[in-house]
Amino acid sequence: MAHAMTAAEKILAAHAGRKQVVPGETVWARVDWCLANDITAPLAIEQMRAMGCDRVFDPARVILVPDHFVPAKDIASAAQARVMREFAREQGIVHYYEVGRMGIEHALLPELGILRPGDLLVGADSHTCTCGALGVFATGVGSTDLACAMALGELWFRVPATVRVEFRGRLPGWVGGKDLALFLISQLGTEGANYLALEFTGEAIAQLPLDGRLTLSNMAVEAGAKAGLVPVGPWQSDEEAPVAARYTWEVSHLEPQVACPYSPAQVVPVREVAGTPVDQVVIGSCTNGRLSDLAVAARILAGRKVHPQVRLIVIPATQDVYRRALEAGFIATFLEAGAAVSTPTCGPCLGGYMGVLAEGEVCLATTNRNFRGRMGHPESRVYLAGPAVAAATAVAGCIAHPEEVIGGGPHRG
């Protein structure tokens, strides 16, 4: 009789050529895709060459996306990007996406349509887990491990146990994938899912658009998870498969959530921090820079102005998102409101550029991390929220519930 397995176990077993795997064992598995960016690719390339390997295992299975420090912000970042660019040309990499044709890697991959449920993706970036929303076992690895995968098309994995998370009920207005993610992390903590596979199920997930699922899977790593899966198609967990834990939450009355400095787990309902003045708002990143995110922000910003003491930076996650936002009139709405709109880049999320914070400054961002110094000066502070709260905050000048802005509620003076 076949052993009951979770979705994560089924995918790893299939790629290891095994009928079954169990949590805790180490397997050697074939990878479908290798992903790297302008920070991590040069390290992986160096390590691959140090191994004595001259060619990648399959130039059609390696994905290289410059997105962190591009368009190049300085000489060092230009050099990093050049290493990656020249390697892509030398190797004949099919999936190399240059500035002007690219996007933030974790938003670009789902958009390209090249991944399939049941695929195994490794990327030298912790938020590779985003693609778990597509039914892919997607996980972040170090650059040395990625070098091995690029050279051999295989890598070792310790099979993670699965934690099944069920979100029940219908999501209320202004609440989306980011709010579910922040609520989840507040419940589990930043280490509550260490080396586990989070599996998202329930009525709220079934109703959640793909963009929201991608946001939820993106932030699985903020709870320490190895993967964040929404089972798709034939890659469903067997109901009787053993899991490490089960959590069930009713979310019909969930308020928009805000993570306070300095942890994605320091989460409260928005009303508990409403009125906190901010200097900057960032709408974008691999977490919330998709078209639906921009649509929510544009709905709130339409006919309104960014508070005179606030800088609003909007960064569409990909070139296609930028184009579609332009066609939909969202970009015009942002510009008329007084926002700065950037070409796709990770930019301020990691304190790279396009919005680095000075000492004492406060930012509310739709990004995924708010550790001390993450967006700039160690004495700056970052709050995390979804695009609705971000747009409302930009207008109010202080952290605000969207209804306060739509309904003409209190604003910062």
Image (cartoon, rainbow, N blue to C red):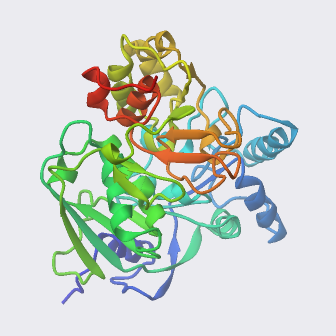
Q: Residue at the spot x=70%, y=37% of the render?
A: 353
Q: Is residue 234 above or below residue 6?
A: above
Quadrant for the N terminus in the image: bottom left
Q: Residue at the spot x=60%, y=26% of the render?
A: 343
Report x, y in % for residue 67: 64, 40
Q: Is residue 346 visible?
A: no
Task: Examine the image and state in which quarter residue 385 appears.
Answer: top left
Report x, y in % for residue 356: 68, 38
Q: Residue at the spot x=77%, y=48% of the render?
A: 87
Looking at the image, residue 153 sits to the left or right of residue 17; the answer is: right
Looking at the image, residue 361 sits to the left or right of residue 194; the answer is: right
* In the foreground, 349 or 112: 349
Report x, y in % for residue 405: 32, 24
Q: Residue at the spot x=77%, y=34% of the render?
A: 73
Task: Examine the image and state in which quarter residue 220 appears.
Answer: bottom left
Q: Is residue 101 visible?
A: yes
